[in-house]
Amino acid sequence: MTFFLKSSPALITAVILVFFFSYSYGQEWQTPLIEGYGEIKYFDNAAEQLNLNQEYKLLFDVTSDKQKNGVNKRLWVVARTLNMMHVSGVPLANIKIVVAIHGAATFNILTEEAHINKYGKSNPNIDLIQKLRANGVSLFVCSQATAARNIKDEEVHADVVPALSALSVLANYQIQGYHLMPK
């Protein structure tokens, strides 16, 4: 203790910074609920934590086919949201997530067979889609988008529900109090 009292302010500052950075950056990325997708680091001392008693009604508009870690970037963000809520302690019963898929993202919901027929390779999104659905996420694909891309109903993955349109999903769920998540 006397060493620190006699030390220079620069040394004390350096020790504090080393402690802070080793604590905050020493944590590993994790995927606690949606295994393999939506990596997070949790900081229990960070401001603006989630409310464990709040019902979260979130709506995601997925239009892009951009990827992150080999899967659709926005579906990856849905996984990250679930992982963050999980480590924060929000009960799964308090999490209501709806996803409207359309535009360039439409091909991301193809069955394995349909994806192989179109692209010559497996659909990298299927595992993530199944894990999201298994954790209560409602996934809808726009029937206007599937029709425009000549995707037959049987080519849509079983965990994704064809909706009249993405616009109907987005309108209906916002009227029901779901909050549209920013891109």
Image (cartoon, grey):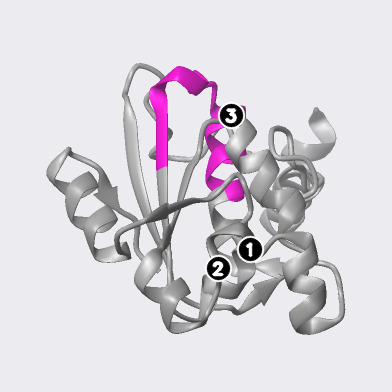
Report the Cα–Cα distance between label 1 and label 2: 5 Å
| Residue 124 seen | yes
Few, some or many C-alpha atoms within 10 Å of disc 2 (few <14, some 14-19, many ≥20)?
few
| Residue 12 seen | no
Few, some or many C-alpha atoms within 10 Å of disc 3 (few <14, some 14-19, many ≥20)?
some
Question: Upstream in the sequence, badge 1 or badge 3?
Answer: 3
Q: Identify the amino acid type marked 3.
A: His
153 versus 89 height, above or below: below
Look at the numbered disc 1 and give the secondary structure of its residue: helix
- The question of residue 89 being in magenta is answered with yes
Look at the image and give the residue range highlighted in magenta. Answer: 79-97
**Disc 1 target residue:** 155
Look at the numbered disc 2 and give the secondary structure of its residue: loop
Q: Are marks 1 and 2 in contact (CB under 8 Å)?
A: yes
The dominant secondary structure in magenta is: helix
Q: Identify the amino acid type marked 2.
A: Lys
- Residue 83 x/y as whole percent: 62, 39
- The question of residue 171 being in magenta is answered with no
**Disc 2 target residue:** 152
- Residue 91 x/y as whole percent: 49, 18
- Residue 69 x/y as whole percent: 76, 67
> Which labelled disc corresponds to residue 86?
3
- Residue 122 x/y as whole percent: 84, 68
